[in-house]
Structures are given as C-alpha cells and as structure tokens.
Amino acid sequence: MIDNTIVTTWGIMGVIGLIAWLLSRKLSINPGLVQTAVEGMIASIENVIREVAPQHVKSLTPFIGSLWIFLVIANLSGLIPGVHSPTRDLSATSALAIVVFLSTHWFGICLMGVKPYLSHYLKPSPILLPFHLIGEVTRTVALAVRLFGNMMSLEMAALLFLMVAGFLAPVPILMLHVIEALVQAYIFGMLALIYIAGGLQYQQQQQEGETNV
C-alpha cells in the first residue's frame, strides 16, 4: 500500500538526489556562494565524525552525512501544508533504524574483516554472547521508537496548540518545530555514528593490545 509516508520519503530522496546532481555539475576551484555553503556543511559533518572516529572520516562521511541531510529535510517536511513528516510514522523510523543496524555491521566487517569484527561478541567471555545480541536488538528498537515518539508528539502538540490558540501564535510553534526537528535529526545521526564507531574502536583497541603484547 502506497501511503503518504512512502510518497514523501521517495520525494525527499528524489529532491536530495537531484540537488546533489545539480551541485556536482558546476564545481569550481573558485567556489561561489552556493558551493562554499555546501563545502562548509560537508566540512562541519567531517569535523563531527572526526571527533568520534578520527581514523574513519573518509569511510563514514557519505553515510552519516546522507543520513543527517535526509533526516533534517524529512523532519522539516511536516511544515509544508498537507504533508506529514515521514519520521512521525513508526514504519519509517524502524526502516531507518534497521539501516543503521545493518550499516554498523557492514562498516565493521568491511574495515576490520569478518572474523575480527564478529569475535568481539565473544569477548571478554562467550557467556556474554546472548547479552550482546539483546543489546543490538534493544538499541535498534530504541533508535526507531525515540525518533518516532518525539516527532509524533511534536506534531500533535503543534496541532493541539493551533486548535486552542488558532493562528495567534504561529511563529513560536514554527520555531519550536524547526528547533526540535534539527535536534532530533542530530541525535539520531550522532547515535548512528557512535554505534558504528564503537564497534570499530573496540576492534582497534583489541588489535593494539595484541600488538603491544
């Protein structure tokens, strides 16, 4: 069944893809205002990633950057009359959380290798394997529910406020929506980055310890 969430999600992805294509066609050594702004945004994303995973900035920037850009636009799309933010739908946030879950293991396996990466589930003792698996599931569920709950409650609060106050105070509601949408996008992307970097750094620490021994 094709609903509003699916249409909006694919529309956002199409807009992002089109803008990226248009911007990449006119790159210049002497950038103009638009290219400078885009390069500044990418540099800011790289700086955040560098603080969490300094050795994997190049590998993680495309995924984390794309995730942040999509979430910002998706969260703010609810401001468009007649459009509901995809992130107020649990199915959409669950899909995003699953993508983060799979990406965590994908990056770990690609950068560290299958055996070294999977071996951390058996450390410091194989007895902890079930707890590691439970932790993977619970944090994925929490990631989906957190974004869904916050965006759903935000839109419901804005709707109730407008029903009570009418359009006497639209600006405060608009600013609240914008700020909360940006905050939720940042938190989701940061948690994804921390999950990915956590596994990679754990393996690096193990390898460094074995080397020192």
Image (spheres, rainbow, N blue to C red):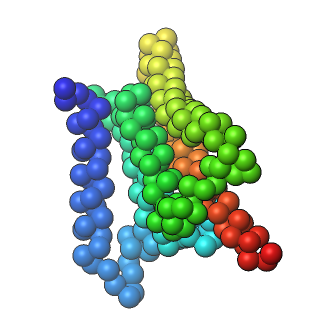
- What residue is shown at x 29% (from left), y 46% (from top)? 12
- What residue is shown at x 76% (from left), y 70% (from top)? 209
Q: Vertically, is 91 above or below 123?
A: above
- Residue 190 lies, in percent from the top left, at 58, 51
Q: Quadrant of the image for the C terminus? A: bottom right
Horizontal side, residue 145 vs residue 24: left or right: right
- Is residue 59 visible in the rendered image? The answer is yes
Q: Vertically, is 163 above or below 101?
A: above
Horizontal side, residue 125 vs residue 57: left or right: right
Residue extending farthest left:
1
- What residue is shown at x 62% (from left), y 36% (from top)? 130
Camera-nearest residue between 195 and 124? 124
- Residue 65 lies, in percent from the top left, at 46, 59
Q: Vertically, is 197 above or below 180?
A: below
Camera-nearest residue between 185 and 213? 213
- What residue is shown at x 46% (from left), y 66% (from top)? 110
Total of numbered circles in the picture?
0
Horizontal side, residue 212 vs residue 181: left or right: right
- Residue 1 lies, in percent from the top left, at 19, 26
- Residue 148 lies, in percent from the top left, at 48, 29
Camera-nearest residue between 104 and 149? 104
- Is residue 65 visible in the rendered image? The answer is no
Residue extending farthest bottom:
29
Residue extending farthest top:
164
